[in-house]
Amino acid sequence: MKYCTAFLLTFGWAFTALAQPGNLGQLELKVTDKYKARVGEASKVTDFPDFKDTTTSKIPVKYSIVSQPIEVKFNPDPIQPARIAKIPVDELYNGMVRVGYGLYNTPLAEAYYNSGRSSKYSYGFSGQHFSTQKGVKDIVYENNGMSRNGLKAYFNRFFDDLTWENNAYARFDKVSYYGLDVEDTTRFAGEEETPEPPSNWYRQFGIQSKLMSPNDKAMGWTRKLGIDYYFLSDDYFTQENNFKLLSSFAIPAQEETIDLDVNLNYFNTVYDSLADFDQSYFTLQMRPHIETYVKDFLFKFGLNLYYNSLSTSLSDESDGNLYFFPEIKVSYPIVEDVLTTYAGIEGHLQHNTVRSLVDENPFIDPGQFLTPTRTTDIYIGMNGIISSTTSFNLRGGFKDANGLVLFYRNPFYAFDSIDPGISVLYDDADIFYASGELAVNLKNNLQLNLGGTLQSFQVKNAKKAWHRPAFTAKLGAGYTIKEKIRLKADIRYVGPRVAFNQADNPLIDSDLPGYVNANLGVEYLYNSRLSAFINVYNLLNTPYDYYLGYQAQNINVLFGIGYRF
């Protein structure tokens, strides 16, 4: 076997040598181990290889879609008509009467009537009477009689794009100058009984008529046209006529609208008690203003322009003045529909008439000179809702008031038999103020309204802002128990006031203390028509003065019934 293997190797090598040309030299071959296959590590040539399909060719295709309606026959089943339930509508009564009677000979009578539901018109009228006789402690006179009487009527006509509103009223009010709390033994010497206090009757009449349109269809750019007339007279031969022409326009200006108010006001007041002295005012007011949004900010820009002319019987010439008041307001919603802050500046001119002064203070002496009040208000505030039932408003700022009305009474009024009432003074004042309001409505059963104002007066000429309190607050509440009993209450606090300079009369106190006046009303609904009520005035029986020497009535209880028809 060994010889055979050597022979084969020698023969194979010789055959190979003969098959190769040339000299191949020597070759040494050593076998050390069995063959083992091994795969080498891969090496990436590129991160983004390019794939090319060289076997498939794309054929270009052109196509289009042609729509063609196809007739479809569809007959839906008819829908059964829904059953509409008859919902009863609450009975709407057209009229109501209320009568009552209280302590100190205090009668009350009220009557109201209104038209029924209509989309074309509405009308109605009402009448009221309330009077009282006594109930004031420590006054010289035996009574403090007052009376308030009023008649009102209205008629409204509704068109497609136009509304015509008309109102008329008449008032007959009596006031007694009972404010004599220090007895002068010489004034009524020789008289068996103390006479009735001096009194005055104020008679007022008024008519208002206006046309209003919400768009351009009925009156073009005109949004309102109106006319007002008021008349006042008293027992001292005072006569006052007041005419007003009112108009409002909406003028388009590209994408915005300019609102323009143009008003004319004329009033004439005659005082026969002052040797036929009279004075007249004519005022032209123009008030352009515009509203615009810049992102979330709401801007209101405007100008309040007045031309005011005064003429009196003491001079043949009239005194004319031109006044400008800016109107700027910026508001920003901190939280949409929840919390808003605002700030601005605005001004206006207010005419002080006998009618407006008597409404504020019925005890003024006849024959007061009239001066308009000009006020510029710079303010900042915030309003919003605390919950679904509670809302609030906070505001504070500075007012520059020219011709601020002040009520002043002679500190020796106990010995003054000529002017039993209160005089009207006018002064310039700087007023810093802060006010707040809170309203709560719980399930329509409980309503609360709370408000307060803090003011600081710096007058230019007088030493103090006579009879002006630094702080006032009020609380109103209403509560319904099982739709049968209604409770109403209002509480008002008025802070201390200064009536005159203490050095002028050291014998009486110049400071009027603050007071709380609380009123309570209870109404029992026997049925939908008949009810009974009890009203209690000055519930706490607080002794206080409205003005120097004019004390408030003691606690008064008034009972009555009401009927709806």
Image: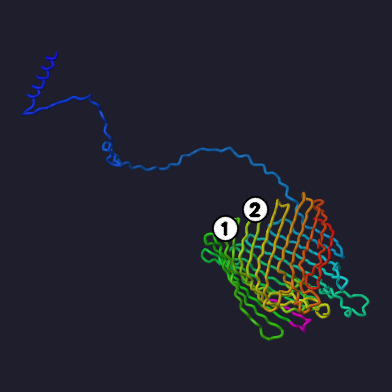
The quadrant in which residue 324 appears is bottom right
Mark 1 closeness class: few <14, some 14–19, many ≥20 residues within 10 Å: few
Q: Residue at x 8, y 22 (%)?
A: 14
Q: On the image, numbered disc 1 is attached to which residue?
A: 334
Q: Amino acid at mark 1?
A: Ile
Q: Label for residue 233?
A: none
Kind of element beneath mark 1? strand
Task: Using the image, determine if residue 436 lies above or below residue 307.
Answer: above
Q: Residue at x 55, y 38 (%)?
A: 75
The quadrant in which residue 362 appears is bottom right
Relative placement, left or right, of 216 versus 100 is: left
Residue 235 visible? The answer is no
Q: Amino acid at mark 2?
A: Ser
Label 1 or label 2, whichever comes before in sequence order? 1
Marks 1 and 2, how far apart at CA: 16 Å
| Quadrant including the C terminus | bottom right
Relative placement, left or right, of 549 versus 194 is: left
Residue 197 % position (x, y) = 85, 74
Over which residues does the magenta segment extend?
266-277
Q: Residue at x 78, y 58 (%)?
A: 95
Q: On the image, numbered disc 2 is attached to which residue?
A: 387
